[in-house]
Amino acid sequence: MRSPSVIVATLALAACGAPQKDEQKTAQKMSYPPTRKDTTIADDHFGTPVSDPYRWLENDTSAETGAWVKAQNAVTNDYLAKIPFRAAIAKRYEELYNFPKVSAPTKVGDLFFSYKNSGLQNQSVIYVRQGLNGEDKVFIDPNQVDAAGTTDISLMGASNDDRYMAVSTQKAGSDWQDITLWDLKAMKQLPDVLKWAKFSGVAWYKDGFFYSRYPTPKKGTELSAASEWQKVYYHKVGDPQEKDVLVWEDKTNPRLYVGAGVTEGEEFATLYVSTGTDGFEMYYHDLRKGGIPTPATRWTALQKGFDHKTSILDLDPASGKLLVQTDVDAPRYRLVAVDPAHPDPSAWKDIIPQKADLLQGVGTGGGNLFATYLKDATTRIYRYKLDGTGEQEIQLPGLGSAGGFGAKRKDTYAFYSFTSFTDPGSTYKYDYATGKSELYHRPDLKFDPEQYVTEQVFYPSKDGTKVPMFIVHRKGLEKNGKNPTLLYAYGGFNVSLTPSFSTSRMLLLEQGGVFAMPNLRGGGEYGEEWHKAGMKEKKQNVFDDFIAAAEYLKAQKWTDTDHLAINGGSNGGLLVGAVMTQRPDLCKVAFPEVGVMDMLRFQKFTAGFGWVPEYGSADNSKEEFEYLRKYSPLHNIKPASYPATLVMTADHDDRVVPAHSFKFISTLQPAQQGDAPVLIRVETNAGHGAGKPTSKIIEEQADKWSFFFANMGVTPQYGLKPEMKQ
């Protein structure tokens, strides 16, 4: 799931190899490791008993669970090792992945920071240079910090005087952050270490910053226990964490997400309070009058209640008005000016009114506003003066996804990135005075993106709703009804899926395959109305949209059941789990990754309580229990012929705990009536996905695509040039 701290806020000219008659298919049911079933465990939900025979797998640190994981991985690894082309896929993926990757620079005074990966480094190295044209020097190399490559290190933000930089360190894929500080003048790390932060940013004010943290968890519960009692603190540079000033807490409700921000000129502190990943409350405090706030400080409410999203972006120094993005009376969002002395919504003045397209976000820089819109899930950027006048569309390189443009008030230029399904991310420098863009960096690829094309179609869902879908394939691909196809989606939490690059997809596309990505309801592509049409009791709309996408691809002869795979992660893993239990006949292969599979107990682990606004909760009411149980993947497994399934999770996932996947596969294996394998792949020393080292990514993708092709009876022809394939 997405972190709640993000407020302002994934051929062809030649055919595939001929299907193999028997070599790739399992002749008889597989033998799976025995899993202890405890039939005495059951919960009573409003008079309805629900058994939970594999609850013991929720204890992810027990020896019994560890032995179970080891046994399951052994079976999965044995199966994958027998796929004859797995090594060829791994080799080809390594070749494709092995190109230099460079981020857009981050300007801090005269210093410029960027992330660079020479190609196959486990983690990107953070470099710094003096001046835009200076020589790069290593600032932090995570690969030197952790030789295993499982430690992710990232910049959190520099102080307003450009003197200090806050750095986040996350280990083995966990959401827990250690926050450390660097003195940029001396170029050395300071002694400050802040522990037990999670979903936190830093908001600098004077000689310190605001951040969010949790109480120290009990030993052994760090990865699974519910994260409760998040508070906001102020840390002064040089002080031990014990001296940090408590800024905000709620002593009555432990299940709130909280975070603070500061306007660029340090005029106002801002505070958001949320029950989950949907709406949030927004408050502000005048730092010029009151200094560092405390729990006794009376914050001014800008938005109360959790039904809307209202975010303070910055202060317009000229007018003294707060720049605020809101969905109040605007489900596709608008930008308004708010007088801090009169914050009532009746006094808000439109700067950028709601339009037909979704206002995804607004940034500031050089005295300008940069508004990012989504038009049918592709980016449009418009520039305005701070009062909303002088609209200018910025011409992007093509249809895709763009981000950046923002900088400080006095800066004269900024950087932005552009990516698409076939462009891994080019960086441009944008001059505020001339309005012109110039290419700053374009990666040197191991394939020709001009050989591939992206189409966008609109298909009808079950209830007639038109749903957009991107379809990516090699130019000239024949619609023969047998093209290996991966259907990927998410459909939730107001998340918008826009064009993005994935090296692993090239393993499919260059073999004559098709990648399809529909923008399901529940996402944010068309604003809050689209989002709410896939929430709570309307969640079935999301599954119907996905099923309709699969049927469309078949009807249009892109593929057929025997050559279709479905894929999604996190909330998308729930999507795949629900669809494969509702329609086991829909596809040949299923990849539910780090999915939310137990919809009756998800709220009891780590950040799960924050998803209740999106899903509802079986503890809340009989109505919510009934609609959750109706689609909960774990509770809808019945004896059937299921597609070949590779459940994917990780032992350090403290976002969607691995018990979801453990219980799901334990129930699925004895229910499988067909010959297709249903397996689980548990990655060790990894989490929900972020910060995963390159070595693990290559292994994981080689396993995934080997499973994909093998269960479709297709032998990929890696090592041959496209024109050589027959």
Image (cartoon, rainbow, N blue to C red):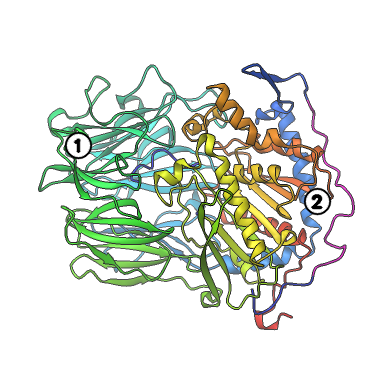
Image-based side of 473 in relation to 282, left or right: right
Question: What x and y, as percent, mark residue 484?
Answer: 69, 65
Q: Who comes first in sequence, dot 1 or dot 2?
A: 1
Q: Residue placed at 53% from the left, 65% from the top? A: 119
Marks 1 and 2, Cα distance to the nearest angstrom?
A: 59 Å
The image quadrant where one finds the C terminus is bottom right
Q: Is any part of residue 39 visible from this angle? A: yes
Give me the residue at 69% from left, 43% from top: 582
Pointer 2: residues within 10 angstroms few (<14), some, or many (20+)?
A: many
Picture layout, residue 34 above or below residue 715: above
Above or below for 717 versus 216: below
Residue 501: within the magenta?
Answer: no
In the depicted view, which residue is nearer to us: 649 or 590?
590
Judging depth in this view, the residue of 431 and 60 nearest the camera is: 431
Mostly what secondary structure, the magenta segment?
loop
In screen coordinates, is 688 left or right of 665? left
Give the x, y percent position of residue 24.
82, 61
Which type of secondary structure does the marked residue at label 2 adopt?
Answer: loop
Q: Is residue 567 above or below residue 7?
A: below
| Residue 268: mark | 1
Q: How many marks?
A: 2
Residue segment shown in magenta: 19-37
Callout 1 secondary element = strand
Q: Amino acid at mark 2?
A: Ala
The amino acid at mark 1 is: Phe
At 60% across and 67% down in the image, what residue appears?
A: 506
* Quadrant of the rendered image containing residue 294: top left
Q: Please give the residue where the numbered disc 2 appears in the rendered image.
A: 676
Q: Alpha-carbon neighbours of circle 1 within 10 Å: few (<14), some, or many (≥20)?
A: many
Q: Position of residue 508 (x, y in %)?
A: 64, 66
Residue 32 forms part of the magenta stretch = yes
